[in-house]
Image (cartoon, grey):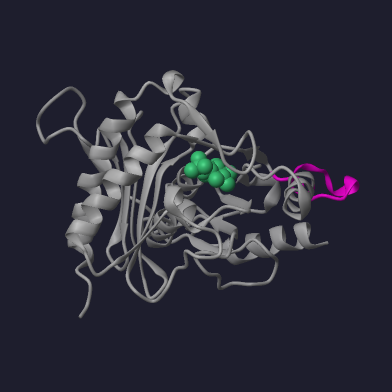
Amino acid sequence: TAVDLQAVHDTLVSVAFEAGRMILAANPSSISTDTKMNAVDIVTETDQAVERMVSARLTAAYPSFAFVGEETYEAGVTRVTDVPTFIVDPIDGTTNFVHSFPNACISLGLVVDRRPAVGVVYNPFQDLLFTGIKGGGSFMQRNASLEEGKGQGARVKLPLGGASPPALGDLSSALVSIEWGSQRDGENFELKARTFRKLAAAKESGGGMVGGMRSLGSAALNLCACAAGQLDMYWEGGCYAWDVAAGWCILSEAGGRMVSGNPGAWETEVDSRVYLAVRGARSGQKELVEELWKVIGD
Ligand code: IPD
C-alpha cells in the first residue's frame, strides 16, 4: 500500500516543533558531552533526549516503518533497506548548538524504496521551517511555529524553486559551501583538504577558484540553503544519511539536484557519504556540476 506522504509530513512537522521546544529549553553550556570518534565529534544530552522523543513518537505512529537515528546508529549494523525508513538527526549542527551559534536544526526524513520522499528541517533558533514532499513541492516558512493570526510577525510560507529560478554561471561566480566535518585524519581528511584547496585556489595555482566558500555547520541547513537559492552548491565528503535525507527531498522538490561528490556519478544513494548538491536553475546546472567535478578530479 502506498504511503500517505502528506500525513507523514504533518506528523514530522509536529514532532519537529516539539523537538524545537526541547532544544530551546536546553542550556548548552551545562550539558556534558561524550566523545564519540574524537574530541570534535560531540554529542550532548539534548541530542540523545530529542532522539528518544522522536523515536518514541514515530514508532508509535508508524510501527511498520524502520527508524535510523544518528545517536542509535551502529556502524556496520544499521542499514537503510527497502522498508519505508525514518532517517533522523536530532540536532544537526551540534557544534553550533553548544556554542549558541544559531544555525542548528532537527532533520527528519522519510525514505521510501531508499529514495527521499518527505523532508522536514526545523531551525528552532530562527523558527525557520523547510519542508518537502516528493511530487508536492517544497516550502520555507518563517515564524513557523506561530499559530495562525497569533503572536508578533506573521507566519510566512514561501514555495521554493519556482518556475524560472536564476541561471547558474561558472564556478567563479558560485557561492559554494563545504564542511570539514568531524573526521580530521586519514584518507577522508586528505580528500576534504584537497577539495577545499582546489575550490579556493586560482587556476594558475591548480584550482577552480569558486566565487565564495562557506561552512554553515549543518549539512541539512546547507541543503536547505541550496533549495532556497541562497547557495549555489554544497560539497561534503564524510557525512551520513541522517545529515542529508530530509534536505535532499527539500532540495529536489525545489528543482535542485543531489549527485555524487565523487566526479562522474549523476545518481547517488542516501548513504553514499560523499555528496554534491546544486540549486535549481533555469540553466547551467549540468555545466556547473561538470566544471566542479573536473576541478576536484584533476
Ligand atoms: C554534522 C554537521 C556538519 C557536517 C558533519 C555532520 P552533527 O552533523 O552536519 O555540518 O560537516 O559532517 O556530522 O554531528 O552536528 O549532527
Using the rendered image of the protein, determine whether residue 230 is visible from the camera's viewpoint. Answer: no
Q: Quadrant of residue 170?
A: bottom right
Quadrant containing ligand 1 reads top right
Q: Position of residue 158 (x, y in %)?
A: 29, 45
Q: Position of residue 288 (x, y in %)?
A: 64, 59
Q: Position of residue 41 (x, y in %)?
A: 58, 39
Is 4 or 197 nearer to us in this picture?
4
Farthest residue, direction bottom: 1
* In this rendering, position of residue 187 left or right of residue 264: right
Q: Position of residue 72 (x, y in %)?
A: 43, 52
208 in the magenta segment:
yes
- Say if 106 sits above or below 138 in the image: above
The residue segment tinted magenta is: 198-210
* In this rendering, position of residue 54 left or right of residue 215: left
- Say if 102 sits above or below 85 in the image: above
Picture residue at 63% right of the left edge, 33% below the top: 39
Picture residue at 76% right of the left edge, 63% below the top: 294
* In this rendering, position of residue 278 left or right of residue 58: right
Quadrant for the N terminus in the image: bottom left
